[in-house]
Image (cartoon, coloured by chain):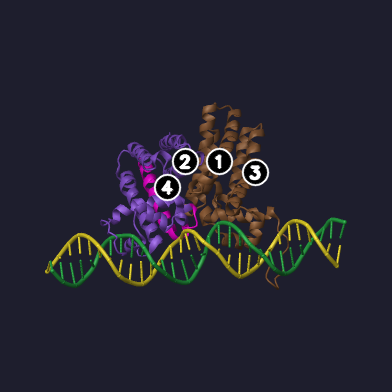
Chain colours: A brown, B purple, C yellow, D green
Amino acid sequence: MAKGTIAKTVSERADLLPLISEVFRSHGYEGATLALIGKATGLGKGSLYHFFPDGKAQMAAEVLAEIDHWFEVNIFAALRNSDDPAQAISDMTACVDRYFRSGHRVCLVGVIALGASRDIFSSQVADYFSRWNDALAQTLRRAGFSARVARRRSADALLTIQGALVLARALDDTKVFGQAMVDMKARLLAK
Amino acid sequence: MAKGTIAKTVSERADLLPLISEVFRSHGYEGATLALIGKATGLGKGSLYHFFPDGKAQMAAEVLAEIDHWFEVNIFAALRNSDDPAQAISDMTACVDRYFRSGHRVCLVGVIALGASRDIFSSQVADYFSRWNDALAQTLRRAGFSARVARRRSADALLTIQGALVLARALDDTKVFGQAMVDMKARLLAK
DNA sequence: GACACTCTGTACCGATCGGTACAGTCTCCG
DNA sequence: CGGAGACTGTACCGATCGGTACAGAGTGTC
């Protein structure tokens, strides 16, 4: 370290991931530079590479894993375990709306899926969506729908969330997202 | 030019845009490097900057303008002029399916909307979606729906297309896109 | 107090970034 | 046939990219 500098307080790896996550979210994988990540975390490259020896790719992989874990705990599990399908779906909708801050925040998994970096993270991306899809379809089956209808409706819900995020950002109008969430919930349990 | 090299046949600006478009589509704005664009077009920087003196930003702006124009001519106009709403919507669906190659191809406007480059192109992005939204809502009004319902359904259709592209790519399953187009068409004219 | 180890910023690396300069070759028009 | 101007590749430019090396400072643990 250069003379006269003072070592900062020790950073917690767990505190880093959410900060790094936001950089990937708003700049994409290729647009998220180490300089940007350094600025967001307040850490130099030395510290960053101390925590993530494999660099940017490792950071992205761990951010994706953390997001996956958050959804597993807060959404997928509730979907699988609930014995009240209508309530579970209502809870999921509210949770998703909160997570994406009513459309102000973008889905990192979706962003990666659209970009060239999908090739690197394809299994993580596919896994996230298919586990969500399975859990939601399972809930719909419990609500009495056929396997076929359940899977069609759950895929429709997932794609509605992703599309609503794109359109809300494109039109700079978060009302689009809110309306889409209302419509989605209604469609999931219709008839 | 270096000695011994042979000047290529003159390139047409119009032939360039589709090639450049594909580079932006699959790498995003920040990921699309001049080297990639040069490789895709077979042109050196000299030629590229001859056609687009303002560089990468101009290329992206012109690609967006061309896409906008294509949709204007092939989709929006048909929506506005048709006197058979059901046929117009059916045509739109088929046209969209063809354009996005059943989900194999991604929407550049959507990709830009999600990325950091949205700030540069926000007006072009918003304009594209809101003109589509207006044209589709107009068709629905002609089909007898209230202004309120028409606008809600048209936004739903736009977001369904975008979401279906994201999910199809994430799951690497284009059946998701096809099913979404079927559902979208049915929802647009339901009841 | 001395050693081991973690965490830190920074100087530096080769490669590549977007962009400029320019000389050479083409085509067209007189 | 001779210049004008469009079009071309390439050598460069400074800046920044992701990544490495490393020495200094902090925090233990004997």
Relative placement, left or right, of A13 versus B109 is: right
Number of callouts in the render?
Answer: 4
Write the residue at 57% across / 42% down: A124
Magenta includes B119? yes
- The chain ID associated with circle 2 is B
Q: Which residue is mark 1?
A: A123
Labels 4 and 1 within one chain: no
Q: Amino acid at mark 3?
A: His
Residue A15 at x, y percent in the picture: 68, 55
- The chain ID associated with circle 1 is A
Residue A122 at x, y percent in the picture: 53, 42
Compare marks 3 and 1 and give the one earlier in the sequence: 3
Residue B98 at x, y percent in the picture: 36, 40
Q: Are marks 4 and 3 in contact (CB under 8 Å)?
A: no
What number is the disc on residue B164? Answer: 2
Q: Which residue is mark 3?
A: A69
Magenta includes A119? no
Residue segment shown in magenta? B114-142
Circle 4 sits in a helix, a strand or a loop, which is it?
A: loop
Q: Amino acid at mark 2?
A: Ala
Q: Which residue is mark 4?
A: B107
Q: CA distance from mark 4 to mark 2?
A: 11 Å
- In this rendered view, identify the residue nearer to me: A31 or A165: A31
